[in-house]
Image (tube, grey):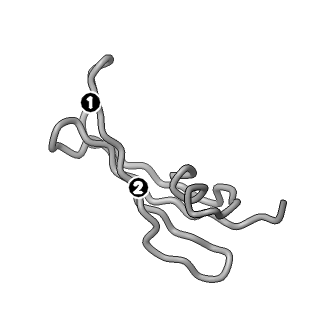
Amino acid sequence: MTNCIFLLGIHAMTAEMNVRFIKKIPVGEMIKIRARVTESRRKLHTVKAEIYLGNIVCADALGKFIEVDL
């Protein structure tokens, strides 16, 4: 999720994150991770992410990130 924010050129730190684990992922399996910014208000950005095993969502997360000055 942080990489999603960084790829947009935003320097931010995690303010809050909630993760929901849905299914087990066996060690060594190939997974796909998707993340996208769903909302941005001033310096607060909300990001939603999912972890997939094939087409099955195994975990999802919602995070809030606050911009920081370097």
Identify the element where label 1 is drawn.
loop
Give the total of numbered labels: 2
Residue named by callout 1: 24
**Residue at (55%, 50%) from the top-left corner?**
3
* Relative to 30, 16 lies left or right: right
Task: Give residue 56's quadrant in the image.
Answer: top left
Can you name the residue that lies furthest to the right here?
70
Can you name the residue that lies furthest to the left here?
55
Badge 1, how many Cα within 10 Å: few under 14, some, many 20+?
few
Depth check: 48 or 36 in front?
Answer: 36
* Relative to 68, 53 lies left or right: left
**Residue at (50%, 52%) from the top-left corner?**
1
* Rendered position, 59 above or below 24: below
Residue 33 point in image, percent of width and height = 35, 44
- Could you tell me the amino acid type at mark 2? Ala
- Going from N to C along the chain, the mark reached first, 1 or 2, is 1
Task: Give residue 59's quadrant in the image.
Answer: top left
- Could you tell me the amino acid type at mark 1? Lys
Can you name the residue that lies furthest to the top here?
28
Residue named by callout 2: 35
Badge 2, how many Cα within 10 Å: few under 14, some, many 20+?
some
Identify the element where label 2 is drawn.
strand
**Residue at (47%, 63%) from the top-left corner?**
47
Depth check: 69 or 64 in front?
Answer: 69
Depth check: 6 or 21 in front?
Answer: 6
Residue 12 point in image, percent of width and height = 69, 60
**Residue at (70%, 60%) from the top-left corner?**
11
Q: Which mark is residue 3?
A: none
Residue 55 point in image, percent of width and height = 15, 44
Q: Nearer the viewer, mark 1 or mark 2?
A: 2
Q: CA distance from mark 1 to mark 2?
A: 20 Å
Which quadrant of the rendered structure holds the C terminus?
bottom right
